[in-house]
Amino acid sequence: MNKAVYSHTLPKASESESNNLSVLILYLGITFVGYFVGSKLRNSEKELKWTNKVQFVMIISLVFIMGSRIGADKQVVSSLGSIGLTAFILTFFIMTGSVLTVFCTRKLMKLNKEGIRGDD
């Protein structure tokens, strides 16, 4: 009786894949910490006026960091023209589709410009 032994090993993750996983775990950890801190502060009676300033600073920091990372990527910078054209075309068709959908829905629901049902 000859038993075949199958051994299968998973391919090792590349360094960039394990780095991406580490960054994902870091983001999820920060998200959960923020959720728990926020849930505790939400139940507080006092007004938290300082949170607006913290949010503003964090958003400005995020935009700056994202801009510097994108600006440092030569491939992105060299293809800004085609990225801009693609963004413009997508935006045009999305907005046109949204306006047409609202127009057709209003006609089907027989709503006038003010959103009031008109009697025919």
Image (cartoon, helix red, strand yellow):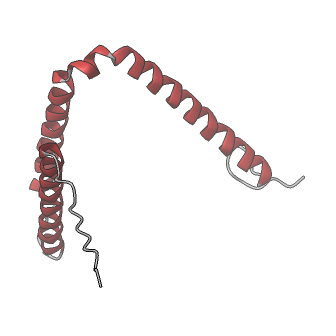
Q: What count of labels does the image hold?
A: 0
Q: Quadrant of residue 77?
A: top left
Q: Nearer the viewer, residue 50 or 5?
A: 5
Q: Is residue 82 left or right of residue 1?
A: right
In the rendered image, which quarter is residue 101 located in? top right
Vertical relation: 27 (above or below) 89: below
Left or right side of 112 for 18: left
Answer above or below: position of 64 versus 78.
Answer: below
Residue 40 coordinates in the image, percent (x, y): 13, 74
Q: Position of residue 106 (x, y in %)?
A: 72, 48
Query: Which residue of the protein is positioned furthest toward the front in this rendering?
Result: 1
Residue 12 seen in render: yes
Q: Quadrant of the N terminus?
A: bottom left
Q: Is residue 52 visible?
A: no
Residue occupying the far right of the picture: 120
Residue nearer the viewer, 12 or 43? 12
Residues 34 and 68: in front is 68
Residue 31 location, quadrant: bottom left
* Residue in view at x 15 percent, y 23 percent: 72
| Left or right side of 49 for 109 | right
Up the image or down, 18 lies above or below 38; here it is above
Q: Position of residue 54 (x, y in %)?
A: 10, 49
